Amino acid sequence: MSSGRAAADRVGPVDRQLLFVVGLARSGTTALTELLSTHPEIALGMERYKRLMLRRASVELRPSLFEPARFFDFTDGLTNITPDASPRWDAYYRHLAEGYDTATYVGDKVTGVRVRMILQRFPAARVVVIVRDLVEVAASWQRRADDPTDAGWREAWDAQEAAVQWNRGLRQLLRMFDLATGRIRVVEYRTLFGDPSGRSIHGTFDWLGLPASPAADTAFDQMHSRYARDLRDRAPELAPTERDAVATMADLEAWRAALRLVD
């Protein structure tokens, strides 16, 4: 990759770089994005450019989207996750705004394993991909598909559709990992949030060349405690026959290969 091409992906100050969090829906992308953004040198949108990202190979995707004036102007209608949507997102974006000008990394969360598109449009960007066990993802998809009040989810996005998308996402990740040497880091949901030492998130900060952060450590401890509580209290969410059907669909060879990429 030429230095000129890499420089084109920088935003504002020469030391500000682009970073994206990528993963299949219900794989922990939101929690990971929130956790990373507690580090004072990281400021990531929460699907800030959602409707652009859904357009495959969108020519509108460019580094200038992450200039502060552009990034915090939500009148563009490119996302439904805005500060006005809920107090949670208002607080989140207020926090981002406080440190955005001095952040080393800025970027966005992208639902769906769209690694190829991101690296085509931003060839010098870094991408953190989170993967999660299929049965857990499928159970979450099915729960939302069964909820008639969930306006943000389609009935067709059920457990079996989760398996189709999970397989497709893993295969794209594996194809791209070797092509984008050093640009992709893979983390696994249970390892990330289940290990009380925080080894995975600390390794991610190291990979980004960032120092440890007390604020991020505090946020991780809270997320780990919530993960442990939820895991203890969670009831099985897929019927045995449905669980078996989903497991049968899984590309286990791709899953094992993806797990070998996890640091």
Image (cartoon, grey):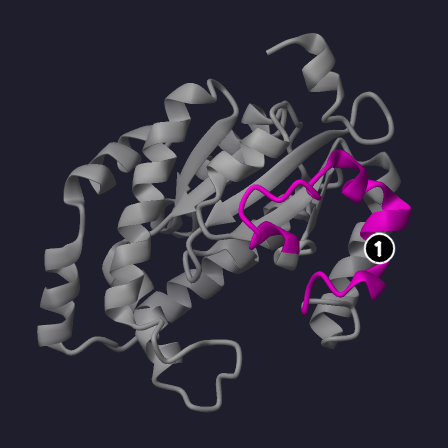
Q: Is residue 47 visible?
A: no
> Which residue is drawn at the image coordinates 81% and 50% (left, top)?
71
Q: Choose between 232 and 131: the one closer to the eye.
A: 131
> Which residue is drawn at the image coordinates 80% and 55% (left, top)?
95
Q: Residue furthest top?
A: 2
In the image: residue 111, left or right of residue 230? right
> Which residue is drawn at the image coordinates 56% and 30% (left, top)?
120
Q: Is residue 176 visible?
A: yes
Image: 155 above or below 56: below
The residue that mark 1 highlights is 72
Q: Position of residue 42 (x, y in %)?
A: 71, 40
Q: Position of residue 101 (x, y in %)?
A: 88, 39
Q: Choose between 1 and 147: the one closer to the eye.
A: 1
Magenta region includes residue 74: yes
Q: Residue furthest right?
A: 69
Residue 13, quarter of the rendered image: top right
Q: Position of residue 130 (x, y in %)?
A: 43, 45
Q: Residues within 10 Å of mark 1 (few under 14, many from 20)?
A: some
Q: Choose between 39 and 154: the one closer to the eye.
A: 154
Q: Which residues are magenta?
A: 52-80
**SS state under label 1:** loop
Mark 1: amino acid = Phe
In the image: residue 59, left or right of residue 149? right
> Which residue is drawn at the image coordinates 26% and 69% (left, top)?
159
Q: Quadrant of the N terminus?
A: top right
Magenta region includes residue 188: no
Image: 34 above or below 151: above
